[in-house]
Structures are given as structure tokens and as C-alpha cells.
Amino acid sequence: MQKKVLGLLCAFVLTIILIAGLWPFHAPKNQVSWLSSGNGLHFGSYGVVLSSGVSGFAGSKDGGSCSLEIWLQPDHGDTGGTILAFYKPEDWIVAFSVHQSIDDLFLQRVTVYQQRPKKSKFYIGHVFRKNNPLFVTITSSAQSTLVYLNGILVRTAPRFGLSSADLAGQLFVGNHPLVENGWQGQLMGLAIYNRALTDTQVLQHYNAWTTNQNAEIKIESPIELYLFNEGSGTTLHNQMNSENDLRIPGHFFVPHAPFLERPWDEFQPSWSYWKNVLINIAGFVPLGFFFCAYLVSVRRLNQAVLATILLGAAISLTIEVLQAFLPTRDSGMTDLITNTLGTAIGTALYSSKSVQAILAAVGLGGLLQPNSAERSTSLSGTSITSRLTG
């Protein structure tokens, strides 16, 4: 009976961990659909649109002026995601990206300096409202980068340094090319220019977009123009150059997701990061506790604590490797470290005299530990546990 109960507990804990780590086990359908009324696309939780090649700025190295116009409507005003991003495969970086961060507009630029990525970013607060259309214009020159909302200048960033070279990568819309970070909402138009726009032009373009004057927008000669007026199909035509058409994949995927990303690359100074760290530690504590109990009480295994910790590390490594092939999950070494630590804490709890006394008090002492001589042999040489339990 002892063997069966502990075996079932171990199987149950392992099943829960595998489900939590690998769900939903497959690539979900790409949640991008055409709007039923008017031009545009709707992006769900797992949606992405991407170009087959690089943008019209390919080969641009001179840091020339550029402009970007986005006509959109968010589904939420209290969440976020990547609206669009330009990925440079030769450098493995997202050179420029536009995000919704809760209700803020967040811009980020990444350059490579001395073989290390250098980030520049800034926020414009409280601009997104649920189901409220927003026309965003980002234009840059040698002097500064300017951001307009609905045709009105709201922010000047002299040191942001956006240039045409940053918009020369593979274009992703509605999600991020490296991690799953979906934006939810409607996208009604997108244009890219190889020049800076004046205040007057920005206002004229805003009026043209919002009144559906497609011909006037095209006359302005952007290098890439997406009106999203196809209404069906999986191809989004660049009205200026068919070589830069976008496509809607059948299933959602993250094409450049990192494999076992390094801990210092995963680190973020945010509460959500530390919350995930704590969850990953706590999630493997039951595995360490019950598998250690099983190896000690049933298998009578010498060095049971060490074997349990190695087992926890192996299970975590397997999950992280498999997560590299699941677009809704991230493969990283931080989880490997925290999961192994959680397993070690679980074995330490099992080995603790206080915990054993509590188990004995509730009538589970005989279930979870052998006689004292066998337990001493199984737990001998476990310096890790000794340090954790003091």
C-alpha cells in the first residue's frame, strides 16, 4: 500500500508539472481575421502577420530619415503586447519595435555596440483606450524622433536616434519575433516612408486615413503601404511594391524563439519576472518532496536526495527543450535553475526533522519514511540538504 500511494502521488505531481510546462502541447491556430465591416485585421491572443523578406529599407546603412504610420484600435486599455517589430536576422536583434504597455505607448530601439546590444526606449503614458481608434505617427530626422497621436505632436525624443537602418529588417505585426507577446486589437492601416514628415503632412495623412481616402494616401508615395482592404485570403499586399507583401500563417508560431535563453538575457526588473521565478521554484517543491520520499521509503536508494535533485533537473531540462518547439512557451535556463532549486527545497523539507515530526503526528510517518537506520543510509552524504535545512 505504501508503494502504491507514493507511486500515485509521484505520478500525479509529475503529470501536473508536465501539463503546466507544456500546455497546450501544440501550435494554436493563428488568430488573425478580417474585419466584417471596413478595412482591417483583428488580432487575437495568438496572432501574427509577417513579411517573407526584409523591408524596403534593405541595404540602408546611412541612418537616413524615416517615418511610420499605424492606424489601429486596441481591444483593451489595461494590457499590452507588441504591435509591430523589425527583426534583423544577421544581428539576432529586434532593431525597432512598437508596443502597447498597459495603456502606454512604448517604443524600443536596439543597436549592436561592441558586439553587445544597446537599448534605447521611451514611453508615452495613457494613450490607449479600449475600443478607441488611434493614429500613431513616428517620424525621425537627424535632429530627433517625433511622435504624433491623431495628428498632434505629443513627444520629441532628441536622443532616441531612430533611422531608416532600424526599419530594414523582417517586419512582424501583432506579435514579437523572439517571444510570444501578442497584441489584441484591430489594425486598419500601415505605412512606411523614407523621409521625415512635417507637422502639416502628419495632419493631412491623419485626415486621409481616418476618412478612408486611400488614393490620397497612395499619392504621398510611402515605400510600403498596407491598406488591409483585401477582405479575405492570406496575403496582405504592399500597394507600392509586391515584393514586400505580408502573409498570414495558418498557425501561430514564433519564428526566431531562442533556445535555452541565458539567465542574464531573460532577466527583467519587474514584479512579473520575480513572480514567475517564485512560481517555478514552488512548482517543483512537491516533486522534490514526494520523489525523495519514494526513493527513500520504497526504493531504499542510497543518495536519494542527490538522485531526486538530478531527476528534477532532468525533468526541467526536458520541458525547456520541448518548450522551444511550442510557440506559446519560452525556452530558458532561468526556469532550469529555479526548478532544480525547488526540487532541492522539496528534498530538504522531506529530510527536515520538524516535517517528519509533523507527519508522524498526523499519522503519515510510516507512509513517508522507513525505519531510522534505512533513512540514515538513504540520506547520507547529502550536503545540499544539510545546508538547506541547517
Image: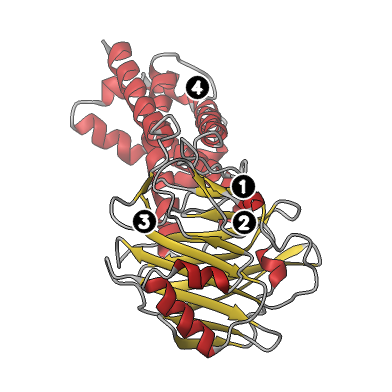
Contact flag, marks 4 and 1 (Cβ < 8 Å):
no
Three-letter amino acid code at the position of disc 2: Asp
Residue at coordinates 32% horizontally, 41% vertically from top-left? Answer: 354
Above-or-below relation of 266 to 117 = above
**Residue 200 seen in this snapshot:** yes
Residue underneath mark 2: 265
Q: Is residue 375 left or right of residue 96?
A: left
Instruction: Work out how far the residue at label 1 is from the one at label 3, CA to CA, in angstroms.
Output: 26 Å
Residue underneath mark 3: 184
Three-letter amino acid code at the position of disc 3: Gln
Q: Is residue 16 left or right of residue 339?
A: left
Residue at coordinates 24% horizontally, 30% vertically from top-left? Answer: 360
Viewer-nearest residue: 248 or 23: 248
Instruction: Work out how far the residue at label 2 is from the one at label 3, CA to CA, in angstroms.
Output: 26 Å
Q: How many other residues sit within 10 Å of disc 2, few (<14), some (14-19) or many (≥20)?
A: few
For marks 2 and 3, the one nearer the N-term is 3
Instruction: Work out how far the residue at label 4 is from the one at label 3, CA to CA, in angstroms.
Output: 57 Å
For marks 4 and 1, the one nearer the N-term is 1
Contact flag, marks 2 and 1 (Cβ < 8 Å):
yes
Q: Mark 4 or 1, which is nearer the eye?
A: 1
Give the SS element for disc 1.
loop
Q: Mark 4 or 3, which is nearer the eye?
A: 3
Q: Is residue 37 left or right of residue 190?
A: left
Please provide percent x and percent y for residue 27.
Answer: 45, 33
Please provide percent x and percent y for residue 189.
Answer: 45, 63
Residue underneath mark 1: 261
